[in-house]
Image (cartoon, helix red, strand yellow):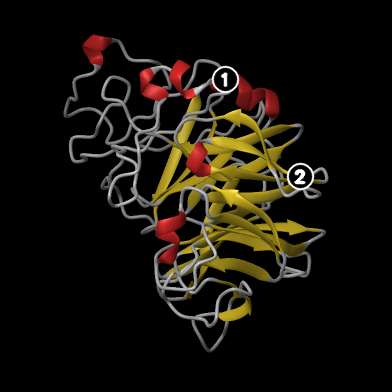
Amino acid sequence: MPATTENAPRLADPCEVNFQQPEPAEMATTPEEPWLQVLSSRHFPAWLAEQRLSLAFTTYQAGKLLLLGLQPDGRVSVFERTFNRCMGLYGDGQTLWLSSIFQLWRLENALAPGELHNGADRLYVPRVGYTTGDLDIHDIAVESSGRVVFVNTRFGCLATLSDQSSFTPLWRPPFLSKLAPEDRCHLNGLALEDGKARYVTAVSVSDVADGWRDRRRDGGVVIDVQTNEIIATGLSMPHSPRVYRGKLWLLNAGTDYFGSIDLASGKFEPLTFCPGFLRGLAFAGVRHRWSVRAAARHDNVRRAAAGRRADTARSRTPQRPARDRPAQWRRRPLGASGRNDQRTVRRGGAAGSGPTKGTRLQNG
């Protein structure tokens, strides 16, 4: 059952934090502080309660699966587990599918309906880990037939699990001449329609090893898996396509815009500007939910004593011209390596193959 203010999950854990803005005098790190502190906007707990949901997301820099829920007193609680370079995530309320650097994990909720564990109505336990090797798995989805489909970014194809091999290829873009572990086009996103794989996103149509890196600014495409047609071009590092209420939504990550694709014209129609590098999208009710990987500012993120880099999540809705945006919102130009100069780095943490506590999750 989704979290409510009366039946909110308490995800008891040493890393549980109070989402209150610290005073400037409190910004200095002390040995007694938890290794991780997360800050949120003031209305975030009320939004979770209003929408009756909890959130799950991954960060491959820190190698963490994080679950956000509500405590009985209405405060946000956090639970985390470590999975090395975790990225792709799919949930249906009972099962979580999670990709890590060498495995694809299936976690199952161990609680019966109405049962609680330390105040949480979901207790996810790793049941099966499929060893795939390093495929750089991005999006994961489960079709209506029950088949697990994932984006095998390293080989540039859609794939499923295999009992004998690392994976079974299902489909590859028509512009790729062969399957090769060379990340030729950076295929990354997958959208289902009517319970079947329908649309994918790629950063370019390159057919050479790492060729997508030269076309990140405007080489992005959306491909119809069923017809092999490229239905949208000129995108900047598109990610996370989703079909919702008859429209194809995606994150045009290179430009910081969330929007939809006009299937008739193939044009991207921006809806809102979100600073950072957008990856990960889900829908809940009539509102959207997305995650943002943004540059961490020194004055609003407490760094752990053992860590030198941090991941933050932010969302903004104003659609302002770049010249009018506050300085901290402006994206820095791509450097020689092609990566934004973001202060996001790996943190250490507790080992994490144990049970994971959380609440009802939406797909995506």
102, above or below 244, in the image: below
Quarter of the image holding residue 297? top left
Residue 318 numbered mark, or none: 1
Q: Is residue 112 visible?
A: yes
Total marks shown come to 2
Q: Observer-nearest residue: 282 or 339?
A: 339
The amino acid type, in three-letter code, at marker 2 is Asp
Sequence-first tag of 2 and 1: 2
Residue that numbered label 2 is attached to:
262
Q: Residue at x 50, y 67 (%)?
A: 206
**SS of the residue under disc 1:** loop
In the rendered image, residue 317, in percent from the top left (x then y), is placed at 58, 23
Q: Is residue 119 left or right of residue 40?
A: right
Which of 123 and 225 lies nearest the eye of the viewer?
Answer: 225
- In the displayed structure image, the side of residue 174 where residue 69 appears, left or right: left
The quarter of the picture where the N terminus appears is: top right
> On the rendered structure, is 174 left or right of 350?
right
Residue 121 is situated, as x and y percent measured from the top left of the image, at: 62, 42
Mark 1 neighbour class, 10 Å CA radius: few under 14, some 14 to 19, many 20 or more: few
Q: Where is residue 272, by image quadrant?
A: top right
Extreme-bottom residue of the structure: 164
Residue type beneath disc 1: Pro
Placement of 169 over or under 61, stated as above or below? below
Q: Quadrant of residue 175?
A: bottom right
288 and 14: which one is in front?
A: 288
